[in-house]
Every structure is written in structure tokens, then in C-alpha cells.
Image (tube, rainbow, N blue to C red):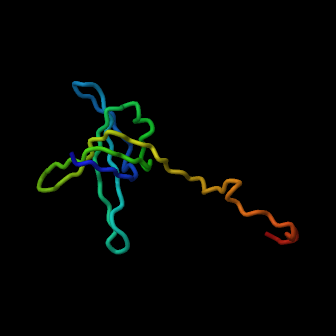
Amino acid sequence: MKAITIVGRLTKDSEIRENAKGGFVSFSVAVDDGWGENKGVMFFDVSYNRPQLSQYLTKGTQVAVTGDLKTREYNGKTFLGVRPSEVKLLGGRSAEPVRYTDHQAPAPTADLDDEIPF
């Protein structure tokens, strides 16, 4: 077994597909590779036997996928895939700015001047 864990974002909305054993959800995950001038992206195809997750697996959602690494050849190109044993939803696309919680916010100072025009 070639175990792998990847963390990345979905490249498009997931799709539900049917087979003889029932349904499954398929999606593609983009994972950053390298840094600086050598930075690239690796793409992994994933098919998971939990079609009910498709409503949460939308483009841009961050996921962690753990499972067996698989490869396939097509027209001289190698495609990477993961046969997952676990899929974790880590978050989605958020238009909201990051907000500090009370324990992270700087403490207010008592000597603030209320006459500042901004």
C-alpha cells in the first residue's frame, strides 16, 4: 500500500456518479508543490463512496484526503489519484476578513484621543 495524505483545494464542484455498488462522489484536489521559483501545483483525482458529501465539496473548499496513492496512464501522461480512506473538510472560501477573537485582540488603552478624524 502506498499511503498518502494530501491537503489542498477543490478545483471544481464535486460530481455524483453511479456504479453497480451504488453512488460515489468524485472531485479533483489541487495541492501546492515546492516554493519560490520552483512552486508548482499537483492535481489528484479522488473518488469517495460517500455521495452525501457532495453538497459540501464545492470549488475552493479546502480538504485533507488520506488513502492509497494510485496512478494511471493516458495518452502518455501520468495522472495521480487517491483511493480515500478518510476525507476531512477543512474549510471553504470565505469572503469574510479574518477576525480576532477576544483573547487575540490587543488590549484597549485608556489614553485614546477621540478627536482623531479617522
In the shown orientation, is residue 7 left or right of residue 112? left
Q: Nearer the viewer, residue 3 or 114?
A: 3
In the picture, the quarter occupied by the C terminus is bottom right
- In the rendered image, residue 32, in percent from the top left (x then y), is placed at 36, 61
- Would you identify the image quadrant in which residue 22 lies? top left
Q: Residue at x 29, y 39 (%)?
A: 47
- In the rendered image, residue 97, in percent from the top left (x then y), is placed at 60, 57
Q: Residue at x 16, y 48 (%)?
A: 72
Which residue is at the far bottom? 37
Number of numbered callouts drawn: 0
- Would you identify the image quadrant in which residue 99 lies? bottom right
Q: Residue at x 70, y 60 (%)?
A: 105
Q: Nearer the viewer, residue 108 or 79?
A: 108
Which residue is at the far left? 76
Indicate whether 39 appears above or below 63.
Answer: below
- In the rendered image, residue 24, in percent from the top left (x then y), is placed at 31, 32
In the picture, the quarter occupied by the N terminus is top left
- In the rendered image, residue 11, in percent from the top left (x then y), is placed at 36, 50
- Would you identify the image quadrant in which residue 31 lies? bottom left
Q: Residue at x 20, y 52 (%)?
A: 79
